[in-house]
Amino acid sequence: MSKVLHKSFYLILLVFVAVFIASSLLVRAQYNYALYGDNPILGMQQWSVFLPVILLLLGSGVGLYVLCLKLNKYSPKVVIPIVLLCSLVIQVIIIFVFPRVPTDDSQTVLSLAMNMLYDQDYSSFETGGYLHMFPFNYSIVLYLKTLLYLFPDNYLVIKLFNILFSTLTTFMIYLIYKQVNDRSTERDYGVLIFAATYLPSLFLNNLIYNDVIATAFLTSCLYYLIRFVREKSWKTIVIAAVFLAMGNYFRSIGVIVLIAAIMYILLNMRSIGMKKVIISIGVLGMLFNVPTWTQNAVLQSSGAVSEPVGENAAPVYMWLNMGINLERFGFWDNMESYQIYQRQANYNKVEGADLFKQEIGNKLSEASASELVQMYYKKIIWTWTEGTYQMDRYGIGNESSIGAGRGRGGGIAGSYSYNNAITELLQGDSAYRTGLLWIVYVMNFLMYCFIFIRLVGGIRRKRYDEVSLILVILGFIGFYILWEIKSRYIYPVYPMLVVLSYMGFKDTYDFIFHRKGTLERYSLRKR
């Protein structure tokens, strides 16, 4: 029965990945603020650019992989620190070359942190305030407040901590790969280098928000969860539970990972044992909300808030309502849902939930079946094939507001503290910026191609070692079919995509170049 379930999860993800690949052959998903504003764009695929970039990336990928194979003779104690240090240096260079300043929510949470630190101003929790509506963002406010208290008041300090979290994620990607692919006879430094130079993760350190931090915690949770299933150690499940609780505290999508973790443990019930299964699930569940409960208790006891945090927060139905939109297929609805909560519900959670349920019902009844199918198809395709995690706006930034955002009445997509020659080259929709976005987009497409190969290979060999990763990815796919979308929202999944795609690339390379014998000889030499 367990094998049947494993295969089913592989097949479900295989279908989605096949749809992503097939759709990308016809449709190009884009997010380019300078050209289109804050809008999701689906246009015809541009094969005159698409195919050459595919060939370029495949050629360079093979070349880099061959170089990585030459590193097998060096100890991990030497290679791993050097790669992580080089990645860290590259990330530091990027935040100096692209000195993007906070905008939108990142500016709001930073301002709130400064108000609380310097003025003891907690009025944002009062009716109509930002934290009254979105109390889950107090975690990032508290984090920023702590950094501002301990270190100089500077954007660079916050971004440097982002870099540390991003580097932790890179290391965890390598450790996860070694756990799920323990049959490999090589040291597989290629996956470490791929993760260390993955462009979205390098650029999104510029985003002063919760994405990078939550991704580091949730990826670390997954690593220790896999170790628990293999080693049956109580220490590993407690560490996994702590990382999961912290990841969820910073981004409230930890429940997706929690459900995936429980399913993964249950799938391995026979090897773990019933007693340990029950206790381990209990540990994950009990620690899951401890950070939030602690935060709320401290806020109430200190008098910073007069009622339980979240008592009248925006209801989850608001984001579900945003997720149903024929024109923008679930993308930000330009304040329509906010206004329902603010003006019609008067910031009342219960009344707001009722209004949103009614609005959702109206949308579903007024739209035809074909319109809904098209909307959900566009929603899935854009979210998962846009590929850049919106690094155009949140990572690179754009100084100019003149003519920018034609799709939404202008505005600045993340201005800079200062300009330099590189920011000038990547200004607006320049050829350099467009080329960079194309590279990241096509890289994402190729990752799906290699994931497809790995999934097919796993099903044919009846080996399902990566099911923990697949469960998390499927959880995110299912969740964002219903929720409001941004391609940035699926950023916490990129570590799993990196691991699976590298496995598929390695399988393909070994098959084409008949390296099975080489691997066996290498293994014998090491013995």
Image (cartoon, rainbow, N blue to C red):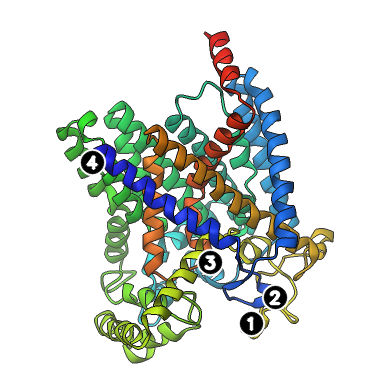
Query: Which residue matches tag 4?
Result: 266
Query: Which residue matches tag 3?
Result: 382
Between circles 1 and 3, the one closer to the viewer is: 3
Between circles 3 and 4, the one closer to the viewer is: 3
Q: Are marks 3 and 2 in contact (CB under 8 Å)?
A: no
Rendered view: 295 above or below 334: above
Residue 249 image point, x, y percent: 37, 56
Query: Which residue matches tag 1?
Result: 407
Query: Mark 1 belongs to which amino acid?
Result: Gly
Rendered view: 105 above or below 52: below
Query: Mark 4 belongs to which amino acid?
Result: Leu
300 displayed left or right of 320 = left
Q: Are marks 1 and 4 in contact (CB under 8 Å)?
A: no
C-alpha gap between disc 2 and disc 1: 8 Å
Mark 2 and mark 4 lie on one chain; the one further toward the N terminus is: 2
Residue 410 image point, x, y percent: 67, 83
Mark 1 and mark 3 lie on one chain; the one further toward the N terminus is: 3
C-alpha gap between disc 1 and disc 3: 17 Å
